[in-house]
Image (spheres, rainbow, N blue to C red):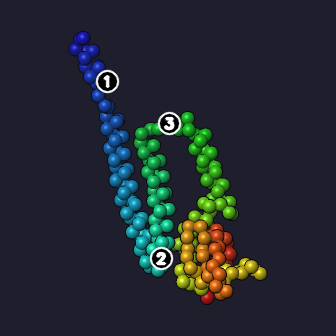
Amino acid sequence: MTNQQYIIETIANEPNLKTYAEIGLTFLAIVLFLIAKKIVRKLIKLHAIKNEHSESRMTYMVKVANFGLVLILISIIAVVWDISFEGISLYLASIFTVIGVALFASWSLLSNITAYMIIFFYFPFKIGSNIRILDGDNSVEGKVEDLTLFFIKIKLISGEVMTYPNNLAIQKPIKEL
C-alpha cells in the first residue's frame, strides 16, 4: 500500500467534521429543550398561582406544553441530521391532515384539549366557582368540581355531577354567579 492510499483510507474511515457538527447541534438542541421546558413550566406555574388554578390543572397544562416542546425538538433534530422526508412525506402529510381536521372537528378529543388550554389561560372561573352555561332551554347551572383535559365537571343544584365537554364550554356564554 502506497502512502497516498494509506492517507485516503485513513481520511475515509475517520468521522468527518459534519458529523461532529451534527452531534454538537443535537446536544445544543437537547440543552435548549431542557431549558425551555423549565422556563415554560415556571411560566405556567406562575400563571396558575396568579389565577388560583388547582395543581391538577397546572399539571395537565405542563404535560401539553412538554408534548409540544418534544415535537419541536424532534423536528430540529431531524433538520440537523438531514433526515430525508422523501420516503415518509406522504405519511407525515396524512398525519398532519388528520390532526388538522381533528382540531376543527367539534367533538374530537384534540379540540377538547385545545379548548382546555384556552380555558386554562383565559376563562375567569376556577374550581369552586358557581357558573351558569347559557344554552337556551338546556342551560346548566352549578358549582365547578373539576377541570380536566376533556371535561368540566359541574355539580348541579340537584346534587348530580355533570360533565360538560371543554369544546362546547368555549362556544357557549358562561356566567359566573
Image point 65% across, 87% down: which residue? 157
Q: Earlier in the sequence, mark 2 or mark 1?
A: 1
* Frontmost residue, 112 versus 75: 112
Residue 25: give x, y in percent of width and height: 35, 45
Residue picked out by circle 1: 12
Residue 17: give x, y in percent of width and height: 31, 34
The correct choice, above or below, for 5 with respect to 53 in the image is above
Label disc, if present, on residue 84 of the rendered structure:
3
* Frontmost residue, 144 versus 170: 144
The correct choice, above or below, for 98 with respect to 140 in the image is above
Q: Are marks 3 and 1 in contact (CB under 8 Å)?
A: no
Q: Quadrant of the C terminus?
A: bottom right
For label 1, the crowd category at 10 Å Cα-Cα, with few meaning under 14, some 14 to 19 and many 20 or more, is few
SS for callout 1? helix
Label disc, if present, on residue 139 of the rendered structure:
none
Label disc, if present, on residue 54 of the rendered structure:
2
SS for callout 3? loop
For label 3, the crowd category at 10 Å Cα-Cα, with few meaning under 14, some 14 to 19 and many 20 or more, is few
The correct choice, above or below, for 117 with respect to 53 in the image is above
Image point 45% across, 48% down: which residue? 74
Q: Amino acid at mark 3?
A: Ser
In this rendering, would 26 be left or right of 7? right
Q: Are marks 3 and 2 in contact (CB under 8 Å)?
A: no
Q: Earlier in the sequence, mark 3 or mark 2?
A: 2
- Label 3, label 2: how many angstroms apart (C-alpha)? 44 Å
